[in-house]
Amino acid sequence: MQPENRFSLSEPMKTFILILSGLILAGAMLTSCAKKEESATDLVSFPLKGEVISIDTIKLRVTIAHEEIPDYMAAMTMPFKVKDAELLNGIEPGDSVNGTLAVSRTGSWLAVLNEFGNGAPPSTLRAGEIEMQRMLKPGDILPDVPLVDQEGRPFRFSDLRDKALAVTFVYTRCPLPEFCILMSNNFARIQKTLSADHTIDGQWHLVTISFDPRFDPPRVMKGYGRSYGADFSRWSFVTDADTAGRNILKIADGLGLVYEDDEGATISHNLRTVLVGKDGKIVEIIKDNEWKAEDVGGKMMGIAKAE
């Protein structure tokens, strides 16, 4: 058996975590009699420059193919939230923009967004905009592809039949708090809730799958799981033995999960969380990050108690 390596972060992530740790420590030294909105001392900000890919004025999101953000994020394409709808006024797909990305302990958003050049809308499909040919739906069996868990052991969904499952997808280097970090925090809360109900012991299981097998082998997934307090008998951290990720892609395609590898840097991706019944059939596919741990935990409890 080879010695276990410690889970490690990239240098930009280390820098960002040190910054946030300092902010958290400073915040802990302050007292307040009432809850307040996050102040400037809770935030770090980064300059952002890139090309607008798409705009969602309903959800107040703009997808930007941006340049590298030094000490934080590699060049990539991803959606950003805006809190002020007026920031989107006059912005069109194809425009060149610059702005300020604000990141707190719990979220991120564009605090400033300015257009400085007009261009034709992008002609190529970007991450999050690819239409899948065959989409899985509730009632379908989740593809039982061969994977490996955090111990390097073979893993298949069929091995967990007769258990209620919640499955989500992450990659361990993801830097934004409302993407992979939020999914893992939510699963940690679900684990705590379900573990407290001993009437469903052995009737549920959580599965976190990395779509970045080249950088997330079993030893890294194990370290990542430990960082979220995982009980590995109830929560598996799974990756693909095929470093090209061909097995995971068979699941991702059916769920509309899209991710774009930026040559070993940050990955642009959307989100999917799947609830699966004891018969291996999909119960629900959640397509965003707006779900609450207590709601999904309650659904999992219902599935686990069902005959």
Image (spheres, rainbow, N blue to C red):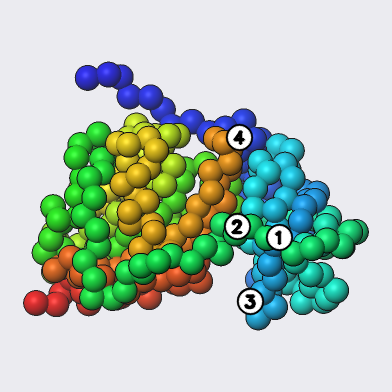
**Residue drawn 27% across and 48% down?**
236
From the viewer's perspective, is 61 left or right of 89? left
Q: Is disc 3 surrounded by few (<14), some (14 to 19) or many (20+) residues within 10 Å?
A: few
Whether pointer 2 and pointer 1 mark residues with C-beta atoms closer than 8 Å, the reply is: yes
Q: Residue 224 location in percent, x, y?
A: 41, 41
Whether pointer 2 and pointer 3 mark residues with C-beta atoms closer than 8 Å, the reply is: no
Dot 4 falls on a residue whose secondary structure is helix
Residue at the disc numbered 1: 122
Quadrant location of the N terminus in the rendered image? top left
Quadrant location of the C terminus in the rendered image? bottom left
Residue at the disc numbered 3: 59
Q: Is disc 1 surrounded by few (<14), some (14 to 19) or many (20+) residues within 10 Å?
A: some
Dot 1 falls on a residue whose secondary structure is loop
Amino acid type at mark 1: Pro
From the viewer's perspective, is 289 left or right of 232? right
Name the residue nearer the viewer: 266 or 14. Answer: 266
Residue at the disc numbered 2: 126
Mark pair 1, 3: CA separation: 21 Å
Compared with 292, 71 (above or below) is above
**Residue drawn 44% across and 60% down?**
257
Q: Residue 161 location in percent, x, y?
A: 12, 60
Residue at the disc numbered 4: 14
Whether pointer 2 and pointer 4 mark residues with C-beta atoms closer than 8 Å, the reply is: no
Q: Quadrant of residue 54?
A: bottom right
Mark pair 4, 3: CA separation: 31 Å
Q: Residue furthest top?
A: 2
**Residue drawn 77% across and 77% down?**
85
* Front tag of 4 and 3: 3
* Front tag of 2 and 1: 1
Amino acid type at mark 3: Lys
Q: Residue 53 location in percent, x, y?
A: 70, 62
